[in-house]
Amino acid sequence: MGRVWLGMRKVVEHLRRLAVIFAVPIRVKIVTETYQREMSPKEFHEEFGGGSPSRVAQQFERLAEHKILREVQRKGPGGARRGGVEKFYRATELAFCDHPTWVALPYSIRLAVGWNGFREIIAQLRRSMEEQTFEARADRKLTSEQLLLDEEGCIRVSEAISEEFSDHWEEQDDARRRTAHSGEKLFRVGSALIFFELPVDDEQVGPSLVASREPLIPFSVRLSKVFEDEVCLQIIDEGNRGEISVPSFHAKFGKRLGLSRDAIRRRFDKIEPAGWLVPVGYKTGGKRRGGAEKFYRATGPAICDEDDRGPWAKVPGSLAESEDWKTLMWLSEKVKRAALAGTLNRRDDMWMAWSDLNLDQEGWERIVASLEALHAFIRAEHEAAKARLKRSGEHPIVVVITLGALEMPKPLKEP
């Protein structure tokens, strides 16, 4: 029997807050930037665009209503503000799933998040290469390799990556405090932390999902439509387990959820256009009395040959021949293989993280040194795991680990 999303109050509350952030794509950018530094709607619009100044201000106000942003100070009137008062905000949280929330999500959603997160990482790395900030610093780092670990090693490596992720954001806070006194200008840095399991002999370990081309809806908006309603998540969870219909779902969960068949049908009608369910057939006869019962399955992301689509499309010859791009293509093939087999997010402690940071020179040097130390730790765990595997006879776990830190170009300004 599938999970019933009742009694999971903290997880549901966290998902509803994420739904508010994801409902409008620019809100994700607002939260990301204001988590790093205080900003006013006016400053955000001047730097990142996002439509009219009034539209940007409305999004700030909406996030503040939900206490996702908090007002930290006001300036004015006077100067460029004339008679107005300028409000400055900081985000109270990142648009990020904590571990309890992540493991509670249906498999197909976690797979889609992992795959789309990887696409975003490739897009960011490609942009830095094309705008020539990737090699702006000789000590920049990008390593990607396949290693053998045991269960103990996987746990230790994942915990080390988690600490590294937190340390990067702390380094940003330290950099901001230092530059407040030194006057040094901060620069934009991207960091990548990737850790996932590869299949053995292309084994299929995840649920059998229906491949479906994603609808022309921003991915964050697709997430918001299901994060805001735990019943939608329950429906998708069931769609991962087998064929479902409105009548079958109502018979199984309607009473416990306190929902009528029409209320459940409205959820199905909301999920299908968002691309989380796809019709797989109809059944007639019996109690259906001449009607046709429509059956659905959960969908998987469209993972195929991406050479002519997405961040892989139309790569210039000079970039395609570079060793760094070849590293990304090697990594892409590994991610595709793991996603298709179901091992990409089989482990609850997998990582597919990209962080946009603002650092000073000292912060940059500390992060590079930290990544070097993490790389050495992972290599040592690889060697220790090989020794433990010989003694225990445990089957090895094949993993891919990618660590990166590089200077990024200025963010693109949205229309």
Image (tube, grey):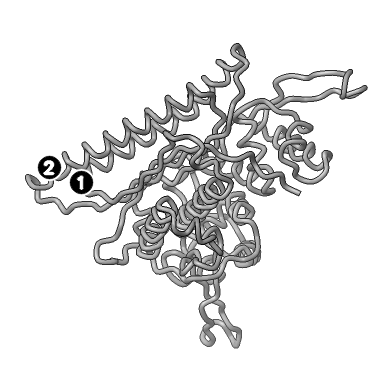
Residue at label 2? Answer: 388
Relative to 338, say whether 163 is above or below. Answer: above
Expressed as whole percent of the image width and height from the top left, the position of residue 217 reads: 65, 60
Viewer-side residue, 324 vs 282: 324
Give me the residue at 71% from left, 40% from top. Answer: 48
Q: Which residue is mark 1?
A: 150
Q: Residue furthest front?
A: 318
Circles 2 and 1, Cβ within 8 Å, touching? The answer is yes
Quote the CA–CA distance across marks 2 and 1: 8 Å
Q: Is 262 located above or below residue 11 in the figure? A: below
Q: Residue at x 31, y 49 (%)?
A: 145
Query: Which residue ends up furthest to the left in the rendered image?
Result: 391
Three-letter amino acid code at the position of disc 1: Asp
Tell me where residue 281 appears, x and y as whole percent: 52, 81
In this rendering, the answer to whether 410 lies above or below 261 is above
| Residue closest to the eye, 136 or 155 | 136
Q: Position of residue 241 (x, y in %)?
A: 41, 65
Tell me which amino acid carries mark 2.
Arg
Is residue 261 visible from the viewing direction of this image? no
Quarter of the figure with residue 226 = bottom right
Sequence order check: which comes first, mark 2 or mark 1?
A: 1
Res 262 → quadrant:
bottom right
Residue 40: % across, % down: 75, 29
* Label 1 crowd (10 A; few <14 / some 14-19 / many >=20): many
Position of 336 with respect to 176 (left or right) is left
Report crowding for label 2: few under 14, some 14 to 19, many 20 or more residues within 10 A (C-alpha): some
